[in-house]
Amino acid sequence: MPLANLEYNLIQELGSTNKRFLLMGDCYYRLLHWPPTDNDSNSIREAAEFCECLDENFFTQHVEACTRNDAILDLVITDEPDMVHDLVNLGPFPGSDHNVLLWSLEVKTVHKLVDREILDYSKADVEAIKRELHEVNWQTFFHESNTEQCRVDLKKRLRILSGNTYQLRDDSAGEINRFG
């Protein structure tokens, strides 16, 4: 049986996103070692395909000890080898045949000071906005535009209306957090 299409598609999609991720879960390959060896199980081919798919996408699987009886069933996969560290198997989870895993996750946060305009909606001329929006021929406005272009055009139009009917507030700087 080849690598399940859902697993393969998920891994391929994660590989194409260029975003950081951690994927954890219960796999159905009864692995004794990571990466799999010829002596691991009777599903050698499926386990090898899974491992190869991870390698092709430059992903790291961090669990190296058995998590259920004599097999590695619970996996922790990331796109960065140094994202997970200090992984510890804490032993059996009460009421389950799986073990509890604990690890440290390296997440970097970037702080940026953002200078932006903040509109004071309490001073908006709502009636003027309604009149101007009512006068727009939306069929013509969005004609032959893709979804992204429609979004951009609408945003520009609303920005123009906002500039005509709103006043700016004084607190125009703020701090945002983004994960690196």
Image: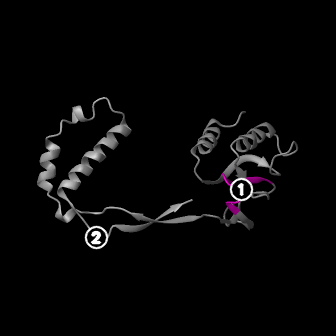
Pinpoint residue 114: horizontal percent, then vertical percent: 42, 64
Quadrant for the N terminus, please: top right
Q: Residues within 10 Å of mark 1 (few under 14, many from 20)?
A: few
- Taking the image as shown, residue 123 lies to the left or right of residue 67, namely left
- Taking the image as shown, residue 160 lies to the left or right of residue 17, namely left
Query: Which amino acid type is shown beneath numbered disc 2?
Result: Asp
Disc 2, disc 1: CB below 8 Å?
A: no
Q: Magenta includes 72?
A: yes
Pinpoint residue 110: horizontal percent, then vertical percent: 54, 64
Query: Which amino acid type is shown beneath numbered disc 1?
Result: Pro
What residue is rendered at 57% in x and 50% in y? 19
- What segment is highlighted magenta in the picture? 71-84
- Taking the image as shown, residue 14 lies to the left or right of residue 144, namely right
- Taking the image as shown, residue 169 lies to the left or right of residue 116, namely left
* In the rendered image, the vertical position of residue 169 relative to residue 98, given as above or below: below
Q: Magenta includes 95?
A: no
**Mark 1: secondary structure:** loop
Q: Quadrant of residue 145?
A: top left
Query: Which residue position is annotated with label 1?
Result: 81
Closest to the observer, 31 or 160: 160
Which comes sooner in the sequence, label 2 or label 1? 1
Which dot marks residue 170?
2
Q: Residues within 10 Å of mark 2 (few under 14, many from 20)?
A: few
What residue is rendered at 84% in x and 46% in y? 40
What residue is rendered at 65% in x and 64% in y? 105
Pinpoint residue 128: horizontal percent, then vertical percent: 12, 52
- Looking at this rendering, what residue extends furthest in the right direction? 39
Quadrant for the C terminus, please: bottom right
**Mark 2: secondary structure:** loop
Pinpoint residue 167: horizontal percent, then vertical percent: 21, 63
